[in-house]
Image (spheres, rainbow, N blue to C red):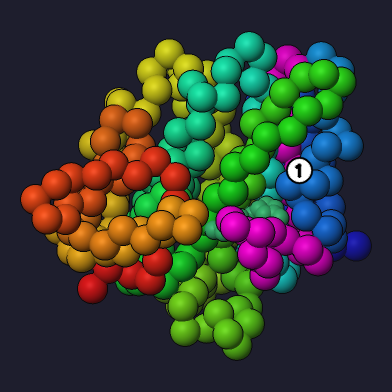
Amino acid sequence: MVVSELFQATKRLKDNLEWLQEAKFFDKVDSTQKRINQFLPKNPEGAVLVIAETQSKGVGRQDRPWYSPPGGIWFTLALPMKDKPLKKVIAFSVLAGLIVAESLKEVNNLEAQIKWPNDVIYEGKKLGGTLSTTTKKFRKEWFLVGVGINVNNDLSDDLKGIATTIKNVRGQAQGRSRLIESVVDGLWAAWNEFDRTGFGPYQNRYMAKLSGIGKTATIVAGDTKIEGEMTGIDPNGAILIKSNDQTKSVQAGEVVGLPA
Ligand code: BTN
């Protein structure tokens, strides 16, 4: 019997990370973001992780479908809110993209960039993304960070022009365990400090990876479209857009297309 790489990785994480309260691996789920609910304990003492080899109903930001065939990294990490108010940790969703991009550098020596707020891109093509949601179980709140990274998986025909995989970039299949471990570890470490630090200490690190600084970009925030020069992000993780000599900060939304 061939034991799957991700099954072993999940077991190793569960054995080695004492703060991981529960870790589950599935060959196939609908979405790790949904399935994780089943494993959230009554007494949150640490984080909970669900990893899948494939998802039949993976979800992306704005409720878009997320193509999740075998060979990629698809997981959700549930972080206990304890008494953290949501408004104190909302910018953690922006930070999650940075943690993925920095892990790609550390583990795969890959210089990924970020398309605000949390698309991870390489040479303009999407390599991965994160999805942050919250949920409640046994009257306890959890912050869920879903991470999707194209590693050795194929890409559907409509994704081929706009997305890429680490295997495409590197020219050969890559291991996934170290990358998962680095992202999971990075998320947990940042989570434990975030209500005290906020986004501020990460601002420069994020700027170093932000795609499109100094270029013209369109930001879509709900029904509003803002066009202007992208000048950076502020200490709360909001994107800064300059138009007609005025700089606006936009906290929620996304950059559409890639800045020219
Ligand atoms: C995005 O739109 O960029 C975010 C994509 C997030 C996908 C991940 S894969 C694991 C987790 N489960 C899901 O259904 N979605 C997230």
Residue located at (45% from left, 33% from top)? 91
Q: Over which residues does the magenta segment extend?
A: 44-67
Residue located at (64% from left, 20% from top)? 81
Using the image as rendered, state which of residue 157 and residue 252 is in the foreground. Answer: 252
Instruction: Please tell me in which quadrant of the rendered image residue 72 appears.
Output: bottom right
- The answer to whether one can see residue 124 in this image is yes
Task: Check the image and report above or below for 112 versus 18.
Answer: below
Residue located at (21% from left, 60% from top)? 228
Is 188 part of what is drawn in magenta?
A: no
Left or right of 41 on screen, residue 145: left
Q: Position of residue 40 (x, y in %)?
A: 82, 29
Crowding near the residue tagged with mark 1, few <14, some 14–19, many ≥20 C-alpha atoms within 10 Å = many
**Residue position marked by numbered label 1 in the rendering:** 50
In the current view of this chain or complex, which residue is farthest to the bottom?
Answer: 157
Is 45 part of what is drawn in magenta?
A: yes
Task: Check the image and report above or below for 195 versus 251.
Answer: above
Instruction: Please tell me in which quadrant of the rendered image residue 44 appears.
Output: top right
Q: Secondary structure at mark 1?
A: strand
- The answer to whether one can see residue 73 in this image is no
Left or right of 247 on screen, residue 194: right
> What type is the residue that disc 1 sits on?
Val
Q: Position of residue 89 (x, y in %)?
A: 51, 26
Image quarter for ligand 1: bottom right
In this rendering, the count of numbered labels is 1
Give the quadrant of the C terminus.
bottom left
Task: Check the image and report above or below for 193 versus 226.
Answer: above
Residue located at (55% from left, 50% from top)? 130
Left or right of 190 on screen, residue 208: left
Instruction: Please tell me in which quadrant of the rendered image residue 86 appears.
Output: top right
Q: Position of residue 200 (x, y in %)?
A: 31, 26
Give the quadrant of the N terminus.
bottom right
